[in-house]
Structures are given as structure tokens and as C-alpha cells.
Image (cartoon, rainbow, N blue to C red):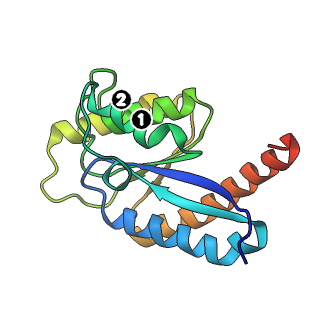
Amino acid sequence: MPQPITLYRVFLATPSDVSEELIVVDALLRDWNLQHGQALGVRLELVNWRTHTRPATGKRPPALVNKQAFDACDLVIAIFWSRFGTPTGRAASGTEEEIRRGIKQGKEVLVYFSERPAPGQKPLEHSRIEKFKRKFGQKALFWSYSTTSAFEEAFRNHLASTMHELLKRKSTHGS
């Protein structure tokens, strides 16, 4: 029998090099749905530009991603590894623009930095990531990890606590 659910969209903001973490995030969102979703009447949906956008014209590509996918999301997960990303005209990378936009819109934004060895990482990319990390760290907390399993363990706990906070906020505000 159909039942109403509350859908939370989780936007994954990453440069193109982050693939192992994408698999982890997807699996943990599915696990959360299985373990908690039905009992709470809540479902988490993984959203990113690769899966939730279509070809379009007339605006900067990040603006099209924002309109088609990002703005409807409730939670932003940003992950950096060996690439910082491509400048957008408004930020040094699409991921940075999504982080800034999420914060401005009052979304929950969780930012992670992988310290796994990155074969062939260019010094300029490393420098861009470190510069952003220092600047971001002055106004926010972020999480660094050195293995994919450490990311998985941390993200599992962070997701649980973030969803607890979002659901508490929803019940308090009655929205």
C-alpha cells in the first residue's frame, strides 16, 4: 500500500577524480534508507550533476546544474582528493561554488578532504586544495581522512547525526 514519505535530496559535490567515495556515499545512503527510512517515513536520494542534469543552453554550466539539480537538495556532501576542479567564473571550482551556494541557502554542508596518496597529482592542484582548506577552515569544520574505510566510518556517523538534526529541525518547525 502506498505511503507518504519525506524525501531528502543529498547533493554530492566533487571534482571528477572522486570515485571510490561516490560508491561509499551511495551505499551508505541506501543502508540508511533500509535501516531507518521506512520506520521514519523518510528516504534519502543521491543527486549529482552526472545523474540529475540534462543538456541545456543559455547559462553558465554551473548555473544550469544549480537549476536542474542543486537547488532542490537539502544536504551537500563535498569531497576533495587530488583535483580541485574547474573555475566557474564565480568560484575557483564547481565544487567550491556548490559549497558556497549550499551555505548561503542554509543547507547542511559536509566537507571532506582525502589525504590518500594521489598518483600524478599536480603541485598546483594540491596547492589550490590546501589554500581552500585553510580559508574554509577559518569559518567551518571539515573532515580529513587517509583511507576509504576511514571515510566510510566517519561518513556513516556524520550522516546519522546530520539526519538526526534535520529530522529534529523538521519536527520542531512542523515543515
Q: Is residue 72 left or right of residue 145?
A: right
Picture coordinates of residue 133 (x, y %)? 41, 37
Residue 58 or 175: which is nearer the viewer? 58
Residue in view at x 26 percent, y 37 percent? 56
Quadrant (top left, top right, bottom left, bottom right) of the N terminus: bottom right
Position of 109 relative to 100 (above/below): below
Q: Amino acid at mark 1?
A: Asn
Picture coordinates of residue 162 (x, y %)? 67, 53
Q: Secondary structure at mark 2?
A: helix
Picture coordinates of residue 73 (x, y %)? 54, 45
Quadrant (top left, top right, bottom left, bottom right) of the C terminus: top right
Residue in view at x 24 percent, y 46 percent? 83
Residue 6 or 169: which is nearer the viewer? 6
Position of 42 relative to 57 (above/below): below
Distance between the Cα atoms at labels 1 and 2? 5 Å
State if disc 2 and disc 1 touch (CB < 8 Å).
yes
Q: Would residue 130 be seen by someone viewing this image from the given angle?
A: no
Q: Amino acid at mark 2?
A: Ala
Position of 104 relative to 165 (above/below): above
Residue 54 or 160: which is nearer the viewer? 54
Residue 64 or 105: which is nearer the viewer? 64
Picture coordinates of residue 100 (x, y %)? 47, 29
Residue denoted by label 1: 66
Residue denoted by label 2: 63
Indicate the quadrant where residue 43 lies: bottom right
Q: Residues within 10 Å of mark 1 (few under 14, many from 20)?
A: some
Residue in view at x 29 percent, y 28 percent? 92
Q: Secondary structure at mark 1?
A: helix
